Amino acid sequence: MDTTTRHIKYQADCDPTFAPAIKAIPGCEKLDSCIQCGTCSGICPLSIYMDMPPRRIMNLVRYGFKREVMNSNTVWLCSACYACTVECPRQIKVTDVMYALKQMAIKERLYPKRFPMVVLANQFYKMVRHRGRMNEIHLVTRLYLLTNWFKLLEMARLGIELIRRGRFSVKPDNIERRAELHAILDYEKRYPPTEAAPK
Amino acid sequence: MTKRYTYFPGCSILGTGRACEESTRAVFAELGVELDDLEDWNCCGATAYMSVDEHKALALAARNLALADTKECPELTTPCSGCYLVLNKTQRYMEEYPRVGDKVKCALKDAGLNYTGRVRVRHMLDILVHDVGLDEVRKHVKRPLKNAKIAPYYGCQTVRPYLDFDHQHYPMTIDRLAEALGATPVHFPLKTRCCGGSQMGTLPNVAQRLCYAILREARRQGANLILSVCPLCHFNLDSYQPDIRRRFGEDVSITTMYYTQLVGLAFGMDPETLGLHRNMTWDGSWLEREVLAGATA
Ligand code: SF4
Ligand code: SF4
């Protein structure tokens, strides 16, 4: 019977490409200068719900603990309030690091399945790509159909109130020059980026 | 002298935040400010697009900057704090990171658009208080809102990370505006605390807890009104009060509105024009009962 597990990580467990990939994203370059002061964790209004506070994420990212970071709920709780970014004494754009992690998680499908935030981001992304604009009612309906359709019933009160007050727009809105928008968004597809090898 | 700005409404404004647009247009028209609509604008991408793809998020928002670039007035203004932040961030990142800027510009050029970098993104609150000015606002006040005790709620994205028109930690712009309308701003320590944003849809227990704290604090400070700046903050604070009461077993009900709606009320405009009937916490007798009663004496 082999149930003994090792709780201390070896450096060999780390992913050496993780930190360089994150640091290459605009806004995340200063990650190494983090002094682990914990200001970001202290100011973060969502940190009480996070399994790992922002300070810890910063440290895990720069030392390459990709699996731990990607398994935590932290980035999916971040609501981009920018409090950490403003308060960090080392001017690290913590919010941008959170965004970079979200992007990587979505690209590599490394997110905790139960998190509706991912579904919301993906549905939003698709809708705006297609139409150029977002319709909140459609977005929320899709979110609940894909995650927890029972919630739609809970939302009935709000829905009725919104209809009564003329705030419920069912007609999706499109921009006129959709081709122009698609040309902009597909730029990378036409000219694939020559991956600048991270140092 | 009429002032003119290029106007970017944003998606929320077309849907649940309609009242924000109605009151904004009414108030700015009264003040003689012309809002020149940006034709065929697209969604700024909000927080969601940035979570999926950085380049695409910046390029998406940059299309709006390029459209604004062709306008005679390079000042692009929006009533939504989310749009304000995203457009502002895009413009700044394109300057700060030439590698990013060049790529986005190439993508725009490919689609026949050009961005020269002359556009400046401005918040409507900034324009109202600093360009139009409080003296001008005061001149239009027909109905001083003497008994309105205001908890000014700025929310996150108006003040962070880019606030160039006020103090980032304890902003006073709405407070001063409220005073100009004859109202009294209360000391409100949570004025820039997060309301949970779009987490209200994804993790309601989390976002409702944040809103609960804000609503409760406003009442504790003796306010009878929360003023918000952004359609999403307003939606969260305005629409979920019954849910919050049920969840936390405490009545935290308080009237909430957009700052432009209050300005309109002080200007003597009728509540319908300002879209007040669209707010969930609006009750027709509120103005008479809480604000005007005894105020004229
Ligand atoms: S506030 Fe900045 S320096 Fe301090 S722990 Fe957070 S990221 Fe590191
Ligand atoms: S931006 Fe995200 S991580 Fe930073 S304080 Fe706000 S919620 Fe927390």
Image (spheres, coloured by chain):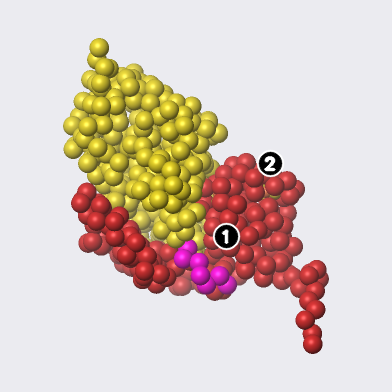
Chain colours: A red, B yellow
Mark 2, ligand 1, within 8 Å: the answer is yes
Task: Name which residue lies at 54% across and 61% down.
Answer: A76
Direction from residue A12 to residue A76 in the image, left or right: left
User: In the image, which residues are magenta?
Assistant: A110-117
Is residue B158 something that shows in the picture? no
Please give the residue where the numbered disc 1 appears in the rendered image.
A75
Please give the residue where the numbered disc 2 appears in the rendered image.
A89
Badge 1: few (under 14), some or many (20 or more) residues near its Cα, within 10 Å? Answer: many
Q: Position of residue A108 (x, y in %)?
A: 56, 73
Q: Amino acid at mark 2?
A: Pro
Q: Residue furthest bottom?
A: A1
Mark 1, ligand 2, within 8 Å: the answer is no
- The answer to if B101 sits in the magenta stretch is no
Direction from residue B98 to residue B40 in the image, left or right: left
Q: Position of residue B263 (x, y in %)?
A: 29, 29
Quadrant of the image occupied by residue B258: top left
